[in-house]
Amino acid sequence: MRRIRAAAVGAVTLSLVLSAAACGGGSASGGSGDNSRPKSLTYWASNQGANIEVDKKVLQPELDKFEKRTGIKVKLEVVPWSDLLNRILTATTSGQGPDVLNIGNTWSASLQSSGALLPWDEKNFRKIGGKDRFVESALGSTGVEGQDPAAVPLYSMAYALYYNKKMFAEAGIQKPPATWDELVATGKKLTRNGKAGIGVEGSNLSNNIHQVFVLGKQHGADFFTPDGKADFTSDGAVAAVKQYIDLMAQHKIVAKGNAEYAQNQSLSDFAKDRTAMVLWQTAATTFKAQGMDDSEWGVVPAPVRSGKPGRGTAVNSMVAGINLAVFKNTKNIDGAMQFVEFMTGDEEQKILNKAYGSIPPVTSAQADPAFNTPALAPLRETLATSAAALPQVPEESQFETVVGTAVKELFADAAAGRPVTTGSVRAKLEKAQQQMPRK
């Protein structure tokens, strides 16, 4: 997901909320039979830009364009990531919510289980041009496999390794690392004079999950069994979490203060020449907002254990992105479908993804040369060849919370100088697994 989220903090209550008789959202006035006032839709957009005002400036002209074409006024609210999930959960139970909304794609299966979101069956996909318009990897993060998707892809992103060219040059480093061993060696050369080799967001639960999920894939671990049961204590899962924490605990290429980072502070350190590398998703617009010129940084695929990125144990990113969903009981279903068709059309896909520095999940829109720049080409290649969707299980949000918290606590141990061992990692993951719903 974009803007690595603090919203997952409240997700541990998701199973309780979703077990209620969710009735969906839909607060729009003026359905097709209401002639007393213009038709309208309420749209909750996620905060994709540097701040909420940036999002309003990006989106409002497009919403005005939609109104001019259809006569449907879209009432926009940009919701911060820290509030978005809890706002959605409240809407699923109260029935007081938007007609159309953005969701982080990793929430798709969890929200799908509420029954509040409109299923995207073949008939509904035909209304927006067909399911085959979308990139396969993006569709893989729209809900539980074998069920009709709960949302459609809107923006696609992938993780990559960003490096500060000035700091690399000062350390005499000629090229960025491609493997984890190279990253550690490079990071040690860059960690000097109060500056760090690489930054992390140790208190950011979702970012923690994204990183250890990828490392888990590289160690042959999935965190869930094929039948959907939590499997956090396998040797591969333990090794993945320890490898990530060891960037601080053992290799000491992460500053101890990063254990408390949760709001993109590592990107600020990067832009201010305090940290030489970051693993992040689609960061170009954020760097620009921090005053960093495009020529001052480079980007390459995220590291793998050996060889080159690919499938299986060579996965180097989760499939990141934003999906667009419709509440099932919207009072303006026709208008909502028109809006989804508009937002996922080639024209808008190019405009919006250019504005946010992301990649269109619509295949035909990707053909635009703007999405084949040096900043985006590695991300596009990653999504096509070496990214994997996070587990599409109803308990995914709880997984983000409990395992993300375990990683946060382990970073706190490392920052305080307490030993981080295979045993202590396994103990934290055992505690996390005990907090998951029993199946």
Image (spheres, rainbow, N blue to C red):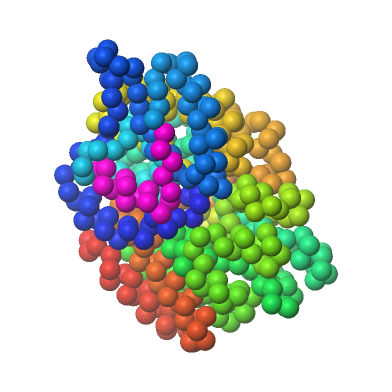
Q: Is residue 149 above or below residue 264?
A: above
In front: 350, or 294?
A: 294
Report whether 41 appears left or right of 255: left
In front: 310, or 335?
A: 335
Q: Residue at x 42, y 82 (%)?
A: 424
> Where in the figure is residue 339, as x and y percent of width and height?
42, 25
The quarter of the picture where the C terminus appears is bottom left
Residue lying farthest to the bottom in this orientation: 418
> Where in the figure is residue 46, as x and y percent of width and height?
45, 43
Q: Which residues are magenta?
A: 76-92
In front: 94, or 138?
A: 94
Report whether 359 appears left or right of 127: right
> Where in the figure is residue 166, as x and y percent of width and height?
78, 62
> Where in the figure is residue 358, as x and y percent of width and height?
58, 42
The image shows a total of numbered marks equal to: 0
Q: Does residue 177 appear in this view?
A: no
Q: Is residue 226 above or below residue 48?
A: below
Q: Residue at x 53, y 47 (%)?
A: 51
Residue 94, by quadrant, is: top left
Q: Main secondary structure of the magenta part?
A: helix
